[in-house]
């Protein structure tokens, strides 16, 4: 039986990721499958990004989170929800970020820097990092990640991979997105605790 320091899971990011990856069986074969899909997925990233933003724009509960200034964005901020159009420079800025994220998933090594990056993806959607005005509810993050997971699955199924490679790639991305999900959820738990103390 593996002995796990449960308190350390809450304070040590690398330890937490290592535990989750080991528990889920996310290893070198999965990383190789993810990297192996790069040549097929990278050209489709703009289409995936557009699909995500079309979905986000179709609900006020998700689109309203593009009204506050986004972290790292220095340009003009829209004044109303009607001003948040697809061609607004802040939306273009956010779309570039999502594109870089999707490319990072299939190209970067899964080292400490990558784990920190995946963790920041969760943190930056709360007031704990980035914009103090930005506080995307967890239900919206779960909806988004679920949509991204399905879009990636559909895209992978359309790559025409050999069946064994297709299965390995789908399983690898499934595990990866569950890891990402945890690194999103943990910041909402921390934010809830901080809010209740305040």
Image (cartoon, grey):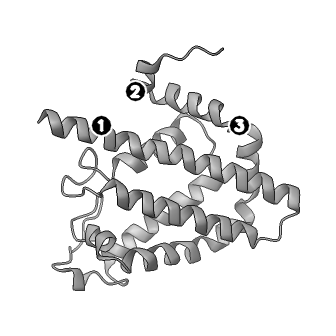
Is residue 35 visible in the rendered image? The answer is no
Name which residue lies at 44% across and 76% down.
55
Residue 162 against residue 63 in the figure, above or below: above
Q: Tell me which label, 1 or 2, sits earlier in the chain.
A: 2
- Residue 78 x %, y %: 20, 77
- Residue 37 x %, y %: 74, 59
- Residue 23 x %, y %: 63, 31
Classify residue 19 by image quadrant. top right
Crowding around mark 3 (Cα neighbors within 10 Å: few <14, some 14 to 19, many 20+) is some
Residue 177 against residue 198 in the figure, above or below: below
> How many angstroms separate mark 1 from mark 2 (CA)?
9 Å
Residue 22 against residue 192 in the figure, above or below: above
| Relative to 186, 19 lies left or right | right
Name which residue lies at 31% across and 73% down.
63
Label 3–label 1 contact, CB within 8 A:
no
Crowding around mark 1 (Cα neighbors within 10 Å: few <14, some 14 to 19, many 20+) is some
> How many angstroms separate mark 3 from mark 1 (CA)?
28 Å
Disc assigned to residue 10: 2
Determine which residue is flagged by label 3. Answer: 27
Crowding around mark 2 (Cα neighbors within 10 Å: few <14, some 14 to 19, many 20+) is few
What secondary structure is found at the residue carrying circle 1?
Answer: helix
How many discs appear? 3
> How many angstroms separate mark 2 from mark 3 (CA)?
22 Å
What secondary structure is found at the residue carrying circle 3?
Answer: loop
Determine which residue is flagged by label 1. Answer: 190
Residue 163 against residue 113 in the figure, above or below: below
């Amino acid at each position: 039986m593996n002995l796990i320091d449960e308190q350390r899971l809450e304070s040590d990011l690398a330890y937490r990721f290592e535990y989750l990856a080991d528990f889920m069986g996310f290893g070198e074969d999965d990383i190789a499958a993810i990297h192996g899909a790069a040549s097929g997925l990278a050209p489709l990233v703009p289409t995936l990004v557009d699909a995500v933003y079309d979905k986000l724009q179709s609900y006020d509960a998700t689109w309203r989170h593009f009204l506050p200034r986004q972290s790292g964005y220095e340009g003009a901020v829209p004044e109303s929800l009607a001003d948040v159009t697809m061609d607004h420079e802040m939306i273009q800025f956010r779309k570039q970020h999502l594109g870089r994220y999707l490319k990072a998933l299939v190209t970067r090594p899964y080292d400490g820097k990558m784990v920190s990056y995946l963790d920041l993806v969760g943190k930056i959607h709360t007031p704990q990092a980035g914009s103090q005005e930005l506080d995307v509810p967890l239900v919206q993050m779960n909806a988004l990640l679920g949509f991204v997971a399905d879009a990636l699955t559909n895209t992978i199924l359309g790559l025409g991979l050999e069946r064994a490679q297709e299965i390995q790639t789908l399983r690898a991305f499934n595990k990866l997105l569950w890891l990402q999900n945890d690194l999103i959820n943990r910041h909402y738990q921390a934010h809830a605790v901080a809010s209740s103390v305040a």
